Image (cartoon, coloured by chain):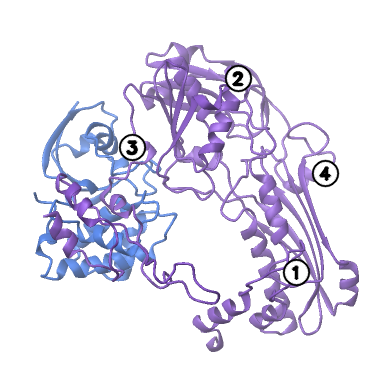
Chain colours: A purple, B blue
Amino acid sequence: MAEDLLERAPDVLEKPRAAPVETLRRADEGLRLPAVAPPTTLPLEPPLVPQVGEQTRAVGLRAQRPDSRYHGLGLTRYIDDIALPGMLYAKIKRAGISSARIKRIDVSKAEAMPGVQAVLLGREIPLNLFGTSIVDQPLLVDEIVRHAGDGVAAVAAVTEQIAQAAIDAIEVEYEPLPGVYDPLEALQPDSPKVHGGDTNIYFKKLIRRGDVEKGFAQSYRVYENRYTTPGIEHAPMEPFTSIADWDANGRLTVYASIGRITLARVDLSKTLRIPISRVRVIGTIVGGNFGGKNEIRHEPVLALLSKKAGRPVKGRFTRVEEFIASTIRHPMIMDYKTGVTKEGKILARQIRMVLDGGAYCSFSETTLGKASILAPGPYAIENIHVEGCVVYTNKTTSGSMRGFGAPQVCFAYESQMDEIARDLGIDPIELRMKNFFREGSMSATGQVLHSVKVIESLQNAARKFGWEVRS
Amino acid sequence: MNVTLTVNGELRSASVPPETTLLVLLREHFMLTGAKTGCDIGDCGACTVIVDGKAVNACLMLAAQADGRTVVTIEGLATREGLHPLQQVFEETGALQCGFCGPGVIMTAKALLDENPSPSTQEIRTALAGNLCRCTGYVKMIDGVHEAAKMLQSTETPALAAPQQR
């Protein structure tokens, strides 16, 4: 019967399937489930790597994922579909207050609750700090709460309900501290400092090319606009979930839908102070990442709960935790000042931007760097000045998300291009064509660009969406 | 408390705490992990199963409410003879990327096609309104439902027409 299916299945790519069909067929016959389709292979002749200017053969064909049959059958095993024998469920108590000092924390009621197997506080974690560039984020807060999603204690219990009841029974007394919630306010010298010290700025970036003041002086008109973008949660369909299993030999196995397994191993080894050779991380199939599953969140906490309880521990973020205790896209405030000639050629562009980094650093350094490099847009401009900084605020941490700052600046420079086009009475496409990078153009950072296809791309796109026939 | 229900054509029963949802019953007691826990509050539709012919969010229904009813999950669609047309089409068109929303989307679409064999695009959109996807988007899914509807109506694939009855 399995052969029937394989023969009946329409060959959507209309190409010979190169996989060992016979092998799969024999393996499948022993199973009750439908036969697994041989993986679609792209032709090796002519070579897959296209010649200069040649279209790749995959473009225009239907794309088929090798794992989509399992997805459709509901058989793909995501992290939450895994259960280990004797597994406990963990919950983390969230601060619920954005800026405070913990005066007292009482876990006695939670510990006494039947079904509760382990309770963990921040001070029990060997190194209660992690981070990808600045190591500033505690796993469970000991003293200073810096945003409402900070964890203050964790519980592992035999059921999720008991774990939640235990979390609710934990008493925490806070002394509220002044907080700062606006990135521009955070720049002020008298603003509360999220991490102490004398400034909330934790990274700066400066890119200069040519002389913007000279460019503005030669310009026919100078436009100044402010653009702001909000924070965005990745909101993957699969909530952040992990299982930690600390075995009797002192070896730790973590199952997690983390995209960067090696980084997770390093962070686990550092925070738990155990050799990396004792840490195994098994990456499961990811139910949506978008940059939000790039670093550890609660894995060391689960590991220590597992060590205390002697049983595997699973932790799954609720949808609310996904929004408050994971990371989000950096909210940005961008000031664009652009000088143009009467014909619309950009002579100078000055950009100043402030990124709201939230309570901890996470991937802010990367995001600021990429946003700054890409801020002038795909335009050949002689005089450029980009100045960016990222600041701490008492809000959800901003981290990596698709594009690392590039979509924010794209929104800003393209919005301003439209405003310039409208004001000068030039067609918006024509204005872009006049300024686009060309073969051999130099970017703001001094990179000489090759294979520049931006003009052809926009021409093609404009033709396809019917730009000439617009009303 | 004891609950007894028909799941994918088989009579199943379990003794569960009263607060158990249908989703937990299916995933943790019957080991049918195809329906997913996405939000647990009825927003995302990743847990969609068919109860007595209607697509429901399994996270919002108590196991006790499903007592005596007939439940079809994603695991009940394919047979040894073949995939359900929706599964086949979703696979071929690449409608599923990470796949986490897939089982829910397919079950919602199946409930729609069972009731309305040739839905309009708007009807498909309305039916899928409760199923969120963050990767691929909805265009390929809507196209896929149209294609599956055509396949279900053609007489050439009788084996695929009613695969959930073993």
Element assignment for label 4 = loop
- Mark identifier at residue B165: none
Q: Are marks 2 and 1 on the same chain?
A: yes
The residue tagged 3 is A81
Note whether A442 is above or below A98 in the view shown: below
Tell me which numbered mark, 4 or 3, is placed earlier along the sequence: 3
- At label 1, the amino acid type is Met
- At label 3, the amino acid type is Asp
Tell me which numbered mark, 2 or 1, is placed earlier along the sequence: 2
Q: Are marks 3 and 1 on the same chain?
A: yes
Mark 2 and mark 4 in contact (Cβ < 8 Å)?
no
Tell me which numbered mark, 3 or 2, is placed earlier along the sequence: 3
> The residue marked by circle 1 belongs to what chain?
A
Mark toward the viewer: 4 or 2: 2
Q: Position of residue A37 (x, y in %)?
A: 25, 56
The answer for how far apart the CA atoms under marks 3 and 2 are is 30 Å
Of residues A98 and A233, the one drawn nearer to the viewer in this rendering: A233
Mark toward the viewer: 2 or 1: 1
The residue tagged 2 is A126
- Mark identifier at residue A442: 1
> The residue marked by circle 4 belongs to what chain?
A
Quadrant where the image shows the C terminus of chain A: bottom right
The residue tagged 4 is A188
The answer for how far apart the CA atoms under marks 3 and 1 are is 50 Å
Element assignment for label 3 = helix
Residue A352, picture quadrant: bottom right
Badge 3 density bin: few <14, some 14–19, many ≥20, Cα 10 Å? some
Note whether B5 is above or below A370 in the view shown: above
The answer for how far apart the CA atoms under marks 2 and 1 are is 49 Å
- For residue A296, say whether it is visible: no
